[in-house]
Image (cartoon, rainbow, N blue to C red):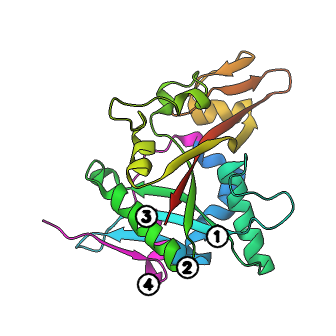
Amino acid sequence: MSTITITTVAERPELASRMYEIRDSWPTFMGHDKLANALFNQVAVTFPDYCVVATADDGRVIGRGRSLPYTTELPGRELYPDGGWDTVLQWGFADQRKGRPATAASALDVAIDADHLGRGLSHDILAAMRAAVQAQGHDVLVAPVRPNAKHLRPALPMTTYITEMRADGLPADPWLRVHVRAGAAIVKVAPSSMVIAGSLAQWRDWTGLAFDRDGDVVVSGALVPVHCDLAHEYAVYVEPNVWVRHTL
């Protein structure tokens, strides 16, 4: 049996640039969040103590987890912003540039290489990220979670989706279930956690769909429909996520 090693990026800085070797299955349109494209790939370099990486015996990177610190002690700030993922990403980098002390930490992603899915590695990476954040003096890790089965039911409001439970009392959604099993509590929906806007031509290119009618368009991999406006020649996707709270 192969041994998997999980460390912080601070402990192995040479892995910061290799975290993207993982083969994932994100839909194409998810790669066009402008804020993410500007900042997300800098997270592991800027906040290495808050990021973890998993490697196999042969040195191959097979998983990663990224989080970042931010402060809630400014006007208009809160621990669980409605703007979710995009908002805490922006706050974290703004606070770092200004030298503001962190009062909170948010997870941003956990990604597993396709060859290692279904082996419990996501649990281990989440545990390592919790430990890394705790080592930085935090007693809570929050996360704007992207439920990984919600795309199968895009018309269902997220507020309804998160109330669906299995017979054992755990969330019906698999990724929410991982967090709850790790000790997290579901707090609330972040209704505008990620916003991706583009021209109709761009959305046609990203999805292969016609985008030839006004209103909602169901896109594969999207958690909710994409809104199409023919007269103004644009479409916009506003993704809801789910805030969870890990007490460390």
Distance of label 2 from label 3 (alpha carbons): 18 Å
The CA distance from mark 4 to mark 3 is 14 Å
Amino acid type indicated by mark 2 = Gln
Disc 2 marks which residue?
136
> Which circle's residue, 4 or 3, is located before the other in the chain?
4
Which residue sits at x=64%, y=38%? 239
Q: Earlier in the sequence, mark 2 or mark 3?
A: 3
Between marks 3 and 1, how big is the CA–CA gap? 17 Å
Which element type, helix, strand or loop, lies under badge 3? strand
Residue 115: image location, x then y, percent:
28, 52
- The answer to whether any part of residue 220 appears in the image is no
Mark linked to residue 69:
1
Badge 3: how crowded within 10 Å, few (<14), some, or many (20+)? many
Residue located beneath label 4 in the image = 11
Three-letter code for the amino acid on which mark 4 is drawn: Glu
Residue wearing tag 3 = 64
Q: Residue at x 52, y 31 (%)?
A: 163
Q: Are marks 4 and 3 in contact (CB under 8 Å)?
A: no
Say which of 114 and 8 sits in front.
8
Q: Earlier in the sequence, mark 1 or mark 4?
A: 4
Location of the N terminus (image quadrant): bottom left
Characterize the local packing of mark 1: few (<14), some (14-19) or many (20 or more) Cα atoms within 10 angstroms.
many
Question: Would you say residue 4 sits in the magenta stretch?
Answer: yes
Q: CA distance from mark 1 to mark 4?
A: 18 Å
| Residue neighbourhood size for the residue with mark 2, other residues' Cα within 10 Å, grouped as few (<14), some (14–19), many (≥20) | few
- In magenta, the rendered stretch is 1-29
